[in-house]
Amino acid sequence: MPFSLKNLKHDLKDVGSNFDGAPELEFRLATDALELEQSGLCYQRIPPRYRFPYGHTHREQEEVYVVVRGSGRMKLDDEIVELGEWDAVRVPPGTWRGYEAGPDGLEIIVIGAPNLGEDRRTDVDGQRDWWTD
């Protein structure tokens, strides 16, 4: 088949509970479902005024975060940036990142490249409560 079609909200399993955070946290992985060969993709919905519980960095993967609804903030190493609808943030490999939702929540699409293949965990380092005030 020359293409793949999935609805990010309805066709993909929500694995938000895997992050041991707010019950309303939504995290849907699309990479395998769409049979992506060169990139990765996921959808996330962060509840109002909630900070995603983990920060992370990649050794090789570059990511782009696109805000599709709501607002929030993102911490990139030691810098904090404000996010609004349709903002796109490119994060290069080696940069730590974390994000939190504003008063209306935050919905984002995350695009990563290259595709990390079967052994995805070897490219990422994560830390719970990385972003503290």
Image (cartoon, grey):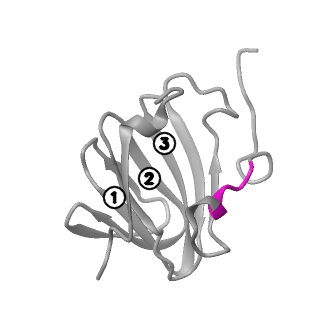
Q: Pinpoint residue 60: horizontal percent, then vertical percent.
A: 32, 33
Which residue does the numbered mark 3 point to in the structure image? 111
Q: Are marks 3 and 2 in contact (CB under 8 Å)?
A: no
Q: Which residues are magenta?
A: 13-17
Q: Is residue 89 magenta?
A: no
Classify 56 as above or below 6: below
Q: Residue at x 48, y 59 (%)?
A: 86
Classify 92 as above or below 105: above
Q: Amino acid at mark 3?
A: Ile
Classify 46 as above or below 126: below
Q: Earlier in the sequence, mark 3 or mark 2?
A: 2
Considering depth in this image, is 25 or 63 the residue closer to the camera?
25
Q: Amino acid at mark 2?
A: Tyr
- Judged left or right of residue 103, residue 82 is left
Q: Residue at x 51, y 78 (%)?
A: 50
Secondary structure of residue under mark 2? strand
Q: Amino acid at mark 1?
A: Arg
Residue 97 — which label?
1
Q: Pinpoint residue 62: horizontal percent, then vertical percent.
A: 35, 39
Q: Are marks 2 and 1 in contact (CB under 8 Å)?
A: yes
Mark 1: few/some/many CA within 10 Å (<14, 14-19, 20+):
many
Marks 1, 3: nearer the viewer:
1
Secondary structure of residue under mark 1? strand
- Judged left or right of residue 71, residue 15 is right
Which residue does the numbered mark 2 point to in the structure image? 65
Q: Are marks 1 and 3 in contact (CB under 8 Å)?
A: no
Q: Is residue 15 magenta?
A: yes
